Image (cartoon, helix red, strand yellow):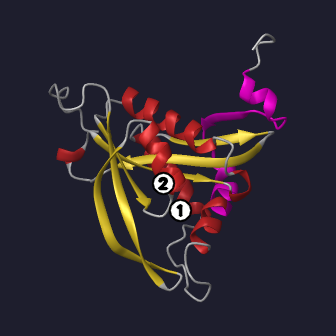
Amino acid sequence: MEDGTPADARADSRPPILVRSSRDDDVDAMLAIYRHHIRHGIEPDVMDSGAPEPDDLRERRKNMRNRRLPHVVATSGGSIVGYAYAVLFRKRPAYRYTAKHSIYVHHEQLGRGIGGILLQALVDACAAAGFRQMIGYIDADNAGSLALHQRFGFTKVAHLPAVAWRHGRWADSVMVQRVLGPGSTAPPPPFTGR
C-alpha cells in the first residue's frame, strides 16, 4: 500500500466500487439487476407478476427516504453494479427498531466484493438511524451470501424448509439476524412516530 492504493484495488484494474444513495435515474438499472435474479431463480414458464414497475420503485424509494431507510447503489465506472435497501421488518410500531434488508448484485459483477460493500453501507446506515436489529432472508443454497453475512456478524436464527419452488424442487430459506448498537441491552429512545 505504498502508493496509497489498497492492495485489492491494485489487483483489480476495474474502476473502484463506490456506494451512494440511489436516485430516480438509477431505477432502470436497478430493475434490470432485480429482474435478472428473479427470472433466473424460477422456471422460464412461470410468470413473474411481482416485479415492480419503474414508477413503483420510485415511489418505494420516496417512502424509504421519508422514513430514513437506506436505499443505496454501488457504482463502478459510472455503471450501477448492485443495489441494496432496508425496510421495516414489520409495519406495526412494536417492530420499529428492526430492519429487514435486501442486496442485489449485477450477475456479471459477482465475486468483486460488491455485496460486502453494500452490506456494510446498510449496517452503518441502519445503526445510524437507530435500528437495533437487522434481519435478512437468504436462499439456503446461497453459500456465498450466508458466509458474507456471517463475516458481518449475522447469525442464523431460523431455517425455513421448503418455502420456495424453484427449478423442479423445493428450496429452503435461512433467516439471519444481527444486533446493531446496544441491541436489546438498553431501552430504545422515546417513540417519535417513525
Magenta stretch: includes residue 12: yes
User: CA gap, disc 2 to disc 1?
Assistant: 6 Å
SS type, badge 1:
helix
Q: Quadrant of residue 187?
A: top left
Q: Residue at x 68, y 33 (%)?
A: 18
Q: Residue at x 54, y 70 (%)?
A: 51
Magenta stretch: includes residue 161: no
Q: Which amino acid, mark 2?
A: Arg
Q: Quadrant of residue 55?
A: bottom right
Is residue 102 at least partly visible in the picture?
no
Q: Residue at x 67, y 51 (%)?
A: 110
Q: Which amino acid, mark 1?
A: Asp
Q: Measured from the top left, where is residue 193 in percent x and y?
A: 24, 38
Q: Which residue is at the far bottom?
A: 45
Q: Measured from the top left, where is residue 5 in percent x and y?
A: 77, 19
Q: Measured from the top left, where is residue 137 in percent x and y?
A: 39, 57
Q: Measured from the top left, where is residue 130 in percent x and y?
A: 32, 29
Q: Which residue is mark 2?
A: 60
Disc on res. 56: 1
How many residues crowd mark 2 within 10 Å: few (<14), some (14–19), many (20+)?
some
Specify start and end residues of the magenta stretch as a single range: 6-32
SS type, badge 2:
helix
Tell whether 187 sits left or right of 8. Answer: left
| Quarter of the image with the C terminus in it | top left
Residues marked 2 and 1 touching at CB (< 8 Å): yes
Disc on res. 87: none
Q: Is residue 18 above or below residue 71?
A: above
Q: Give whichever of 136, 146 is nearer the camera.
A: 146
